[in-house]
Image: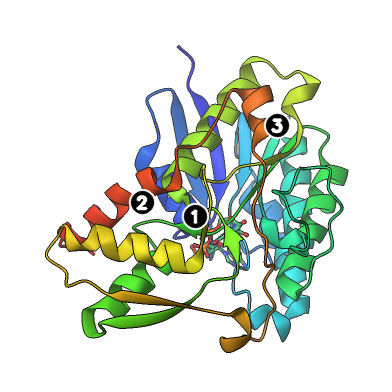
């Protein structure tokens, strides 16, 4: 059996860490990140891939500081827009397709149903605009692309909502959490497994329907408040005291960047063209909370 070699951008991000940890026997994962590869610096991108060999390149690195992007849009666009396009171009030069991670923030969230891939984009913030620029740049640079839009990513690694809630729960018996934004929590571990399966199928059967934009989030939906409730409920299994969640309106929790009220993504295309449906988010949350509360490394 020939192993598939994936080069993934980033070193310590949630998705790249999950990919490094979960690489199955048929897939080799090599991570290229800072300082060797800096997506804000075009020369470092081309140099970092010198002498590299890859069956598939995965662009998982990004400027992900949604609020900070409002005052650093140029940098965010250099990394998420131009940098992503250059990674896709370099992949093309290596003869490899590119899998690129994108986001629900390319939409404005005004639709009253889950977003499909062909729905009009209309980002309402700088981060979303920079990621949308990346989608166009990737598609322009490499005809063999799979853009996987995801949302509400959490994991045992890096910074994320689940870790924040568990930290708050250590000292508080009640938290106020936004209850009028709707989406689907998505485990970076499920994303890693999906990326591996997409890579396998792109290599084995590179037919036109394997390329394009795909929505990839945990099955079922929630509000941030419901997500927080689930985290605290799981945590009680590990001796944590219950925490009451009070849902609040987005307007009561002002942030520099606006967030879409509807972040739900319809995963039918990924199911149809790849046979992949992510597990229900609640099911995937369980092992992450277990690990965060039982593994001394956390
Ligand atoms: N987190 C979410 O809720 C969410 C939601 C929707 C979509 N996404 C998308 O999913 C993908 C993965 O997100 P994530 O949660 O794994 O992100 P993350 O945990 O914030 O990690 C970001 C990664 O990008 C790397 N990076 C940032 N700036 C860089 C630069 N200039 N050059 C090279 N690498 C750089 C970081 O490098 P270091 O390793 O050096 O720190 C890190 O590895 C991203 O494309 C993101 O836009 C995320």
Using the numbered discs, state the Cα–Cα distance from disc 1 to disc 2 in whole angstroms.
8 Å
Tell me what residue is drawn at x 79 percent, y 58 percent. Answer: 132
Q: Residues within 10 Å of mark 3 (few under 14, many from 20)?
A: some
Please provide percent x and percent y for residue 178: 52, 75
Residue nearer the viewer, 93 or 168: 168
Quadrant location of residue 89? top right
> Is label 1 in a helix, a strand or a loop?
loop
Res 292 visible: no
User: Does the beta carbon at disc 3 come under 8 Å from ligand 1?
Assistant: no
Residue nearer the viewer, 209 or 115: 115
Contact, CB < 8 Å: mark 1 with mark 2? yes
Q: Earlier in the sequence, mark 1 or mark 2?
A: 1
Residue 185 numbered tag:
1
Quadrant location of residue 214? top right
Q: In the picture provided, is 173 more to the left or to the right than 145?
A: left
Quadrant of image for the N terminus: top left
Using the numbered discs, state the Cα–Cα distance from disc 1 to disc 3 in whole angstroms.
19 Å
Please provide percent x and percent y for residue 207: 76, 18
Please provide percent x and percent y for residue 273: 68, 23
> Is label 2 in a helix, a strand or a loop?
helix
Tell me what residue is drawn at x 15 percent, y 62 percent. Answer: 296
User: Does the beta carbon at disc 2 come under 8 Å from ligand 1?
Assistant: no
Mark 2 = which residue?
285
Residue 269 numbered tag:
3
Residue nearer the viewer, 269 or 208: 269
Tell me what residue is drawn at x 77 percent, y 52 percent. Answer: 86
């Amino acid at each position: 059996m020939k192993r598939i070699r994936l080069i993934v951008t980033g070193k310590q991000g949630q998705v790249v860490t999950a990919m490094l940890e979960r690489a199955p026997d048929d897939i080799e994962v090599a991570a290229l990140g800072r300082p060797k590869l800096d997506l804000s610096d075009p020369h470092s991108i081309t140099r970092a891939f010198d002498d590299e060999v890859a069956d598939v390149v995965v662009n998982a690195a990004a400027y992900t500081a949604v609020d900070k992007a409002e005052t650093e849009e140029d940098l965010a666009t250099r990394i998420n827009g131009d940098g992503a396009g250059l990674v896709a171009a370099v992949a093309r030069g290596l003869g490899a397709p590119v899998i690129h991670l994108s986001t629900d923030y390319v939409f404005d969230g005004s639709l009253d149903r889950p977003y499909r891939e062909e729905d009009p984009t209309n980002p309402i913030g700088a981060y979303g605009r920079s990621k949308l620029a990346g989608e166009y740049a990737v598609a322009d640079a490499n005809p063999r692309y799979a853009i996987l839009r995801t949302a509400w990513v959490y994991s045992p690694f890096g910074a994320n909502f689940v870790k924040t809630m568990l930290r708050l729960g250590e000292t508080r018996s009640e938290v106020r959490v936004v209850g009028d934004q709707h989406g689907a929590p998505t485990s970076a571990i499920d994303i890693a497994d999906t990326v591996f399966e997409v890579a396998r199928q792109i290599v084995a059967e590179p037919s036109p329907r394997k390329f394009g934009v795909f929505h990839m989030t945990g099955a079922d939906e929630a509000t941030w408040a419901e997500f927080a409730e689930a985290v605290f409920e799981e945590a009680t299994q590990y001796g944590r005291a219950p925490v009451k969640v009070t849902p609040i309106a987005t307007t009561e929790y002002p942030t520099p960047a606006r967030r879409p009220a509807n972040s739900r993504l319809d995963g039918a295309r990924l199911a149809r063209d790849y046979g992949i449906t992510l597990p229900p988010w609640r099911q995937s949350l369980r092992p992450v909370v277990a690990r965060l509360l039982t593994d001394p490394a956390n």
